[in-house]
Image (tube, rainbow, N blue to C red):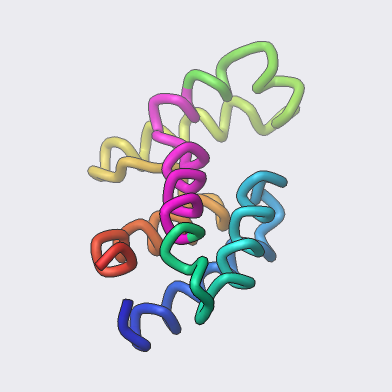
Amino acid sequence: MNREVKDYVTEKTHELMEAHSCSREAKEAAQAWLDAVGTEGEAEETRKYIAELEADIMPLDGLIAFAESDMGAKVFGDNARGVAEHGRELKAAGKKYCDCPACAAVEAILEKKEEMLA
């Protein structure tokens, strides 16, 4: 991975880790990747990091279904209906994923996936 891509992914990784919506697993994978950058383990941690990010990013259909579920109502409270509607608006605009801070950072990182694995 070239320096420009590494710097970009590092910046987005810090954004991900600072996001209130970042899962514990994603934070752990992000930190493991940051710790491995520049070491012999970088390639392996990069593969693990990408796998975790792909598992964590929320497709809009999943977000909408979750927001409309009983569990979504517990998580989002009075905002659940608005979250579902926002998801439908994003989908109508051609977006594929949730736009919360964590998912936005993950999407930006995954756009560099091929370059990260090169």
Name the residue located 56 percent from the left edge and 54 percent from the top edge.
102
Q: Quadrant of the C terminus?
A: bottom left
Quadrant of the rendered image containing residue 43: bottom left
Query: Looking at the image, how many numbered discs can be counted on the residues?
Result: 0
Front one among 88 and 43: 43
Relative placement, left or right, of 113 versus 104 is: left
Question: In the rendered view, would you say 54 is above or below 108?
Answer: above
The percent coordinates of residue 58 (x first, y second) are: 47, 37
The percent coordinates of residue 8 (x first, y second) are: 42, 79
Relative placement, left or right, of 18 versus 29 is: right
Look at the image and tell me whether residue 11 can be seen: no
Question: In the rendered view, would you say 7 is above or below 81?
Answer: below
Highlighted range, magenta? 46-64
The percent coordinates of residue 19 (x first, y second) are: 66, 59
- Magenta: main secondary structure: helix
Look at the image and tell me whether residue 78 can be seen: yes
Q: Is residue 103 magenta?
A: no
Question: In the rendered view, would you say 59 is above or below 10?
Answer: above
Quadrant of the rendered image containing residue 93: top left
Q: Farthest residue in the bottom direction? A: 3
Name the residue located 52 percent from the left edge and 40 percent from the top edge.
56
Name the residue located 67 percent from the left edge and 55 percent from the top edge.
27
The percent coordinates of residue 72 (x first, y second) are: 65, 22
Q: Quadrant of the N terminus?
A: bottom left
Relative placement, left or right, of 21 versus 89 is: right
Q: Is residue 53 magenta?
A: yes
Name the residue located 51 percent from the left edge and 44 percent from the top edge.
52
Front one among 10 and 37: 37
Q: Farthest residue in the front direction? A: 40
Front one among 9 and 97: 9
